[in-house]
Image (cartoon, rainbow, N blue to C red):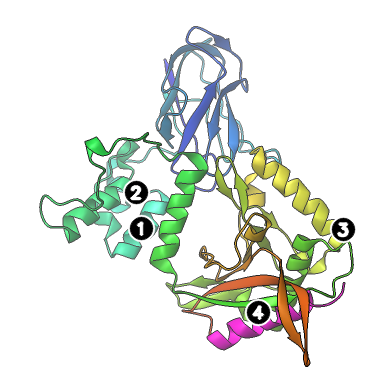
Amino acid sequence: MFRFTLPDLGEGLQDAEIVSWHVAVGDRVAVDQPLVAMETAKAVVEVPSPVAGVIVALHGQATDRIDTGAALVDFKLDTDDAIAAPAPAPATASGGVVGQMPTSDHEISATPQRSASTAARTSRAVPAARDLARHLGLDISSLRGTGRDALITVDDVMAAAALTVQPQGSAMRPTLPATAGGEFDVLRSLRRAMAQSMSMARDNVMECTVVDDADIHAWESGNDYTARLLRAIAAGCRAEPGINAWYDATSQGRRIFHHIDVGIAVDTPDGLLVPVIRDVGNRTPEQLRIEINRLKVGARDRSLPAADLRDFTFMLSNFGVMAGRYATPVVVPPAIAILGAGKVSRDVVAVGDAIEIHRRMPLSLTFDHRCVTGGEAVRLLAAIIADLQRPN
């Protein structure tokens, strides 16, 4: 029997959720035949079979979460001969399995086996666990992993933190009483990823928000709101390039970028997704609209590859298309700023000694005050407003 374990589906994610199986116990499968659709925080990925044979066991059912490296499928192979592992293949634009998928050994694993002496020297941990341990001041090498081959998981770090900072018998998080009633909805997929991302932002960013309004009364007909916001962000980042950056708290430094890649928050039935529009400063309004439409469709049907969902240098939340004037948008590290655009309204304004009714767009800029001064933030916001107030 050969056991296939869940490979790393990209970005160092620690687990994935089963959407649906394409095979059943007793089925005969060929190499590269799709076995299961797995949903990560990034996308829905089809996992192909690494071998040819008969399905002996399936580990998990729809909605179950499987840890990276945990058992996924057991096979009875068509041949007892060793099967050579193919060379690693890069992920395709359609979003496939990232990394090498071995096809030999009694247990097929996404991570190489190590000797006991090697394991003693180096602690194996998922990236999120390492980041959390660093934030909590825990020595990762002192923890005992409960994952496969002693892999240290986020739960292991949380358990160690509970023993360290909580009185004996107390819990780190409150639990709902059994008599609370209602329907309990387990956070999955994008919503679970959002919870983790927001917790990380809360614990790692010193947020400050400034608000103002852009008078867009002079706009000519046919202006594309989102495209204009993207152009204005580019103008703001040119005025204050130090805010188009990432912050590294460990080295206490900023990585400032010359390209402007804006992550746009997209509301989907499954939760929040942030596809990225690349190089917004060098695109025409028409090119921006085409890219906006592509990313929105891909976000809502979960077909975007991982490359379209990472490495933004600035963020935009255009929540005003639904409701709301001002907000305190959340900066997601390592980025250091996010612009929120509220609902455009007709406001009474003073023009000289007269009173007029103008259309105005409320703006909320949140920035990481650890590495951005108030002066830098308001200068960036002023440049954004100046660009938005141009007629076209």
Q: Which residue lies at the image location 61% right of the left edge and 38% below the top edge?
A: 88
Task: Give the Cα distance between marks 3 and 4.
Answer: 24 Å
The answer to the question of whether label 2 and label 3 lie on touching residues, with beta carbons closer than 8 A, is: no
Question: In this image, 120 relative to 243: left or right?
Answer: left
Task: Give the Cα distance between marks 4 and 2.
Answer: 38 Å
Q: Which mark is residue 381?
A: 4
Task: Find the magenta span and give its range.
Answer: 374-392
x, y percentage for residue 219? 85, 71
Type of the residue with mark 2: Val
Type of the residue with mark 1: Leu
Mark 4 is surrounded, within 10 Å at the Cα level, by few (under 14), some (14 to 19) or many (20 or more) other residues, namely many
- Against 339, is 73 above or below? above
The answer to the question of whether label 1 and label 2 lie on touching residues, with beta carbons closer than 8 A, is: yes
What residue is pinned by disc 2? 154
x, y percentage for residue 282? 82, 67
Furthest toward the left, the residue is 168
Q: Which mark is residue 346?
A: none
Type of the residue with mark 4: Leu
x, y percentage for residue 7? 49, 35
Front residue (pair 118, 76): 76
What residue is pinned by disc 3? 286
x, y percentage for residue 55? 49, 12
Q: Which mark is residue 132?
A: 1
Q: Earlier in the sequence, mark 3 or mark 4?
A: 3
Task: Give the Cα distance between marks 1 and 2.
Answer: 7 Å
Q: Is residue 110 visible?
A: no
Q: Earlier in the sequence, mark 3 or mark 1?
A: 1
Q: Which residue lies at the image location 24% right of the left edge and 47% below the top edge?
A: 144
